[in-house]
Image: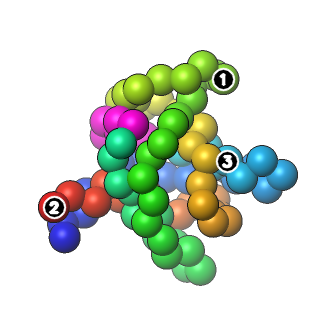
């Protein structure tokens, strides 16, 4: 499986399990992402994402999104788009 970097985690909101991610490429609902860092390594499907508390289906490079994550992430973790 190939992977292409789509963003970086800029903040993690512990109480609600949401990562703020600065995108460097387009990301869509339904995509599978792989989040990787020093102590982070998991894959998940993007079920929903938000920009400024509004649900969006797609976000592009330069935007910052909120993404509900399955596990704890850390600032600086890299987000990859898992491609078949």
Local secondary structure at mark 1: loop
How many neighbours does mark 1 have within 10 angstroms: few (below 14), some (14-19), or many (20 or more)? few
Q: Which residue is mark 1?
A: 53
How many neighbours does mark 2 have within 10 angstroms: few (below 14), some (14-19), or many (20 or more)? few
Question: What quarter of the picture does the C terminus occupy?
Answer: bottom left
Answer yes or no: do the residues labelled 1 and 2 have beta carbons within 8 Å?
Answer: no
Mark 1 and mark 3 lie on one chain; the one further toward the N terminus is: 3
Local secondary structure at mark 3: strand
Question: What quarter of the picture does the N terminus occupy?
Answer: bottom left
Local secondary structure at mark 2: loop
Label 1 – label 2 distance at C-alpha: 31 Å
Q: Residue at x 24, y 63 (%)?
A: 3
User: Most extreme residue toward the right, as rendered?
Assistant: 15
Mark 1 and mark 2 lie on one chain; the one further toward the N terminus is: 1
Label 1 – label 3 distance at C-alpha: 12 Å
Residue 75, relative to residue 50: is it above or below?
A: below
Q: Which mark is residue 84?
A: 2
Q: Which residue is mark 3?
A: 18
Segment tinted magenta in the rendering: 23-29
Residue 57 image offset from top left, x and y in percent: 41, 26
């Amino acid at each position: 499986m190939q992977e292409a970097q789509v963003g970086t985690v800029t903040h993690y909101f512990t109480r609600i399990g949401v990562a703020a991610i600065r995108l460097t490429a387009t990301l869509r609902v339904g995509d599978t992402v792989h989040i990787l860092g020093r102590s982070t390594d998991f894959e998940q499907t993007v079920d929903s994402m938000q920009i400024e508390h509004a649900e969006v289906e797609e976000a592009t490079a330069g935007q910052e999104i909120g993404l509900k994550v399955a596990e704890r992430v850390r600032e600086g973790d890299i987000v990859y788009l898992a491609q078949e």
